[in-house]
Image (cartoon, helix red, strand yellow):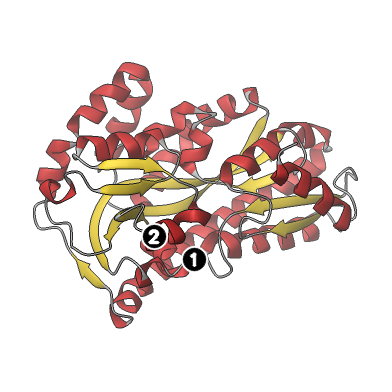
Amino acid sequence: MNRSILGAILCSTVFAGAASADTVILAHAQPPGNPRSLAADFFAEKVAACSEGRIEVNVAGAATMGDDVEALTSTSANVIQITANSQGATAQIIPELNVIGLPFLFADAPSAWKVIDGEIKAQIDERAQAAGLKLLGLWDNGIRHVSHLSKSITTPADLQGVKIRTPPDDMTIAIFNALGGNPAPLTFAELPTALQSGVFEAQENPLTNIYSSKIHEITKFISLTGHKYETSPLLASMAWWSSLSPEDQACVQASADEATAFQRQTATEQEAEVKQKLIDEGATVTEIADRQAFIDATAPVYEEYRAKFPELVDTITAEAAK
């Protein structure tokens, strides 16, 4: 049996038994203080309040239940009941989710929220349910940027042959292949060691994740490429969700909606502060003067995904253009 699933079973016993309908586990991979971590705690409090104690959500953060892929596996199997996950890992199960991360599609996170909260979310939820998961919300994982061990990235040429870590995310890999890099996936928990050992020269993440995980202490050259936007899907086991009464489903969904707003606001506030913190702590933060060069280089990614999901790509690009 997978070690993380076995750990989840053992941990659920400690938490009074996930088999009990009243006690559930929410797993995520981020460290304390990250917006995902704060929002998970917020969600747990809201569920306890609106269910009048009928549902207790125990939060297991910092990848204690395994990485994002393992947490998804455990959630779909109802070993754990909820995960605040990553877009890349979830897109392995729900490939349509990839289109949210088309390169340079959104200028900022609020622009993305306006587009993804309507029909796009409904379509993804439909596919999630078919895979044994209920989409409760699309939390924010920010606009992503590149950090490098020894140099700033100012043109696509600076990425030629660069060994860059990505999440297990087909879209991100496609973007860096188009930019001439040498991308490869690795779990987030293993990233610092891989950078320190020289397995990778660079990585890409939102500034908040770079700061909260102290990646800037290893890769001090941060370039504000803004190459893609990502969500952090909040997903529940469909088996668990279906077992709830309509009243408790309404409670969980309302709590998820409040937690989504809280998480996005927290992410926005941290993003506004973290750039200066990175500079103050010795990072070199570089703006991109010629963004069009990056946009032009990644144009083939749109055609690749339009061939796979023509209607969805056309819908999201049209909405983003507004």
Q: Quadrant of the N terminus?
A: top right
For the residue marked with disc 1, what is the amino acid?
Answer: Thr
- Left or right: where does residue 271 sit relative to residue 49? left
* Image point (59%, 48%), residue name: 67
- Residue 105 appears in the rendering: no
For the residue marked with disc 2, what is the amino acid?
Answer: Ser
Lower position in the chain sequence, tag 2 or tag 1: 2
Instruction: Determine which residue is flagged by label 2.
Output: 197
Give residue 89's position: percent from left, percent from top: 51, 39
Observer-side mark, 2 or 1, equals 2
Q: Nearer the viewer, residue 14 or 26?
A: 14
Crowding at mark 2 (Cα within 10 Å: few <14, some 14-19, many 20+): few
- Left or right: where does residue 260 sit relative to residue 241? left
Whether 218 is drawn above or below 263: the answer is below
Crowding at mark 1 (Cα within 10 Å: few <14, some 14-19, many 20+): some
Instruction: Determine which residue is flagged by label 1.
Output: 266
Q: Nearer the viewer, residue 30 or 199?
A: 199
Give residue 248's position: percent from left, percent from top: 80, 44
- Residue 34 appears in the rendering: yes
Element under disc 1: helix
For residue 172, what is the image quadrant?
top left
Give residue 260's position: percent from left, percent from top: 56, 53
* Image point (37%, 32%), residue name: 99
Q: Quadrant of the C terminus?
A: top left
- Left or right: where does residue 249 sit relative to residue 254? right
Identity of the residue furthest to the bottom in this view:
280
